Amino acid sequence: EPEVTQTPSHQVTQMGQEVILRCVPISNHLYFYWYRQILGQKVEFLVSFYNNEISEKSEIFDDQFSVERPDGSNFTLKIRSTKLEDSAMYFCASLPDAGNTIYFGEGSWLTVV
Amino acid sequence: QKEVEQDPGPLSVPEGAIVSLNCTYSNSAFQYFMWYRQYSRKGPELLMYTYSSGNKEDGRFTAQVDKSSKYISLFIRDSQPSDSATYLCAMKGRNSGGSNYKLTFGKGTLLTVNP
């Protein structure tokens, strides 16, 4: 069964460093998303991406964050100058055209120290 | 009032029990309702997707939606130890599709099924 894959599964970084989280969405999907889950908290929407541009972003997704689809398969989330409060599980998700449900990856656990 | 409220539990039941998980919501714009299962430090896995008020059954799982009360439930029959996980409710609005697709989640209920 096709799945969304994410790398790395776990990354530890020092505060102030830049981090890139990578995702390979399901191949025929057109819409891509990043969600975040701080330990013990709700899964929260960050950003949606379609046709090589951001469609919608939450208030969490400030100038520190950026997304990119550098080629036909990868979808990345970059966090510049990481802060301690960026420590969370980051989930990539994708949706097919005319689809009703999104499919999540396994997540990338980011620890900022 | 929070948009989506879900009792975080934890909920512990013996194997074979019927489990009832619930969420309430305040936003009338929510029209589509989902239940996800999440194992520890893993991604949410879709269990059920519903739109209409009423019941939808899939194997041991039944999703129930009452839009008039803004209340949704997930029932698990004959619960198994492998059902032990966090169960997340999620919902979205009617016009939230494609590039506007945005899920609002509950906090999740941690369920343990004891053998």
Image (tube, rainbow, N blue to C red):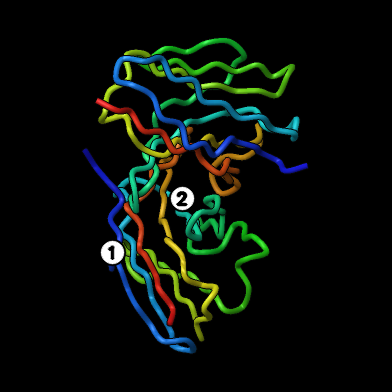
Left or right, residue A27 beside residue B104: left
* Residue B101, percent from left and from top: 57, 44
Q: Which mark is residue A79?
A: none
Q: Is residue A6 above or below residue B3?
A: below
Do marks 2 and 1 both belong to one polypeptide chain?
yes
Q: Is residue A20 above or below residue A28?
A: below
Locate the C terminus of chain A by quadrant: bottom left
For label 2, the SS is strand
Q: Quadrant of residue A95?
A: top left
Q: Is residue A99 visible?
A: no
Q: Is residue A24 visible?
A: yes
State the CA–CA distance, disc 2 to disc 1.
22 Å
Locate the N terminus of chain A by quadrant: top left
Q: Mark 2 against mark 1, which lies toward the viewer?
A: 1
Q: Which mark is residue A31?
A: 2
Residue occupied by mark 1: A9
Q: Is residue A68 above or below residue B49?
A: below
Q: Amino acid at mark 1?
A: Ser
Which mark sits nearer the N-terminus, 2 or 1? 1
* Residue B54, percent from left and from top: 58, 10
* Host chain of mark 2: A
Q: Residue visible at 38% across and 76% down?
A: A20
The front one of A72 and A65 is A65
Left or right, residue A100 beside residue A61: left
Q: Residue visible at 42% across and 12% down?
A: B57
Q: Quadrant of residue B69?
A: top right
* Residue B19, percent from left and from top: 44, 20
